[in-house]
Image (cartoon, helix red, strand yellow):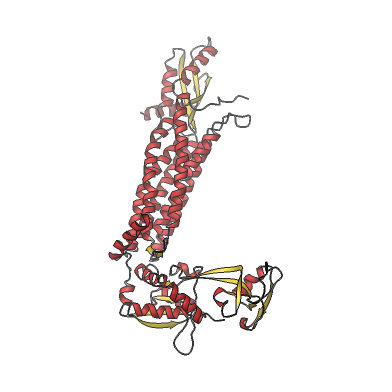
Amino acid sequence: MRTTRDFELPPDKAGANQRAIRLEWITVGYLVSAIFFLYITLGASQAMKAAWIEDILSLVPPISFLIASRVRRRPPSERYPFGFHRAVSVGYLCASLALAAMGLYILYDSVSKLAAFEHAPIGLVQPWGEPIWLGWFMIPALIYSAVPAVFLGRVKLPLAHELHDKVLFADAKMNKADWLTAVAAMVGVIGIGLGLWWLDPLAAILISLDITRDGIKNLRTATADLMDARPTLIESSALDPLPQRLRTEILSKNWVRDAAVRVREEGHVFFADIQVVPTSAENLISKLAAVARELMDLDWRLHDVVIMPVEKIEDERRADSLRSGAHSSQ
Amino acid sequence: MTKGLAFVLALTLAACGIPRDPEGTLARASGGVMRVGVTEAPPWVELGDASPDGIEVRLVERFAEEIDAEIEWIEGSEEEIFSGLRVRELDLVIGGLTAETPWSSEAGITHPYLTTTALVAVPDDTDEPGDIAGLKVGVEANTEIAGLLRKSDAQVVEVDDIADHDGPVAIDNFLTDDLDVVDTGVRLSESDHVFAVPMGENDWMTAVERFLLERPGEIEDLLDELGRP
């Protein structure tokens, strides 16, 4: 059985990949400590609970990244002839589903607390024998849960671009936005301190909306990936120009009368299948082989190119979508 | 360093009156009336024909004195007094509550002011047994301790009055002196004792907590005096 090539990242990306893996390990370690500090200062504050759950959830992207970074390197096998690139997409789907579900849960929980006029009770703790109001410990714990995260997010963002990694991108964005959660939770805690009990569930509602929005946004992207939607740019839903470049490239050959290109994302990398209508069958096999090699060199993300000579582009819709789609990507 | 800093911070901020009460309970009770829900739970709360007595009742009386409040005692079942607390018709609920109370979603539960243990003890003139396997242990019938003891490998001897029983017993730790027994080191359970306040009245709650936490000695003395079998 034919399988695809088994390496994924070109050599010049190896350093970036190593750095990303190291950063994700640091992220996991740091998040575990932040989750612990938030847990011990949690009290009855709804906003703290939301911030805490968000931190637990933000473990999912780095863990999926780390698992995927191992799995996707596996060479294609008889049973998985396309390789394991989609391990990333599967991880991404799980992460976004968890985000969306938890976001909705906290939203429901906070709205019902607000509606029930439930005032959060926060009392004293005695860590060193001196009784101190627990609220005062929540604020440093929240600061700790936000400040390093923002820096980690800033370092990871360019790596996500370089590696064309959506999980890493989602993770970096979440880290960067973490300070918003922390500030909202602080407002909630200070609200409790000032006797403004409703600030706490209100802050929790804001945090949960943010979590839900993140989850739904990522869920859409992950689903689109698994549905073989056209490749999009990593930071937006704009179409990636690569399919059109491939088509332009292949149409520039004088032996090609027409062509249709279909590209899908498998995790990091792209798989392309191309139909060409040749002007003649002369030397066709060597021409096809040469053009396939040429196309593969256009972009490192292009992992596998299948070119099939056809009499005419049968599926008009397919041809149209690619022609028009190619324009709309501009 | 951190400790000192946190302490200074706490003092500074306590001076700004944080945390505050959304409903102003502490301000209203100070120099006014505090409404305290009580339910029978000896030795913590004992309701007789006269006014209530017990370890927690005395603590509440001392607290009331400190904030110059008069106490209005409201007797009821646990459900009744917690329902009253939820709608803020009561300011405080006592009755041998522990941190495990199922009412914790209806009320503010204070920091534990005392931890008691249920343990197995033997008369102080006998040799301490290595373990309690097969040991005949007396326990008051139909109590939580009896149930916990049954799960151990001791032989359960149910009695009506633990004070009349000779030999090893399963009791609360504060009864060892009264019964002239010594702890074997076998623990059946731990209870963290708490009071309950209306949800979110955090100034009031921390005032009650601070009062209790600053008096470990007084609480021990009360336990000696009132914690009888």
Q: Which residue is painted at 39% across and 61% down in the image?
A: A134
Which quadrant of the figure has residue B119? bottom right
Q: Does residue A207 sit above or below A263 in this rendering?
A: below
From the viewer's perspective, tell me whether residue B42 is left or right of residue A127: right
State the residue lying farthest toward the right.
B134
Q: Does residue B168 sit above or below A50 in this rendering?
A: below
- Count of picture labels: 0
Asked whether residue A188 is in view, the answer is no
Q: Nearer the viewer, residue B6 or A226?
A: B6
Q: Nearer the viewer, residue B123 or A114?
A: B123
* Quadrant of the image containing the N terminus of chain B: bottom left
Q: Which residue is painted at 48% across and 16% down in the image?
A: A291
From the viewer's perspective, tell me whether residue B215 is left or right of residue A292: left
Q: Which residue is painted at 44% across and 36% down in the image?
A: A166
* Quadrant of the image containing the C terminus of chain B: bottom right
From the viewer's perspective, tell me whether residue B150 is left or right of residue A90: right
Residue B181 x/y as whole percent: 61, 76
Q: Does residue A39 sit above or below B40 in this rendering?
A: above
Residue B127 x/y as whole percent: 67, 72
Asked whether residue B60 is in view, the answer is yes
Residue A277 x/y as whole percent: 49, 18
Q: Which residue is painted at 60% across and 24% down in the image?
A: A2
State the residue lying farthest toward the left.
B16
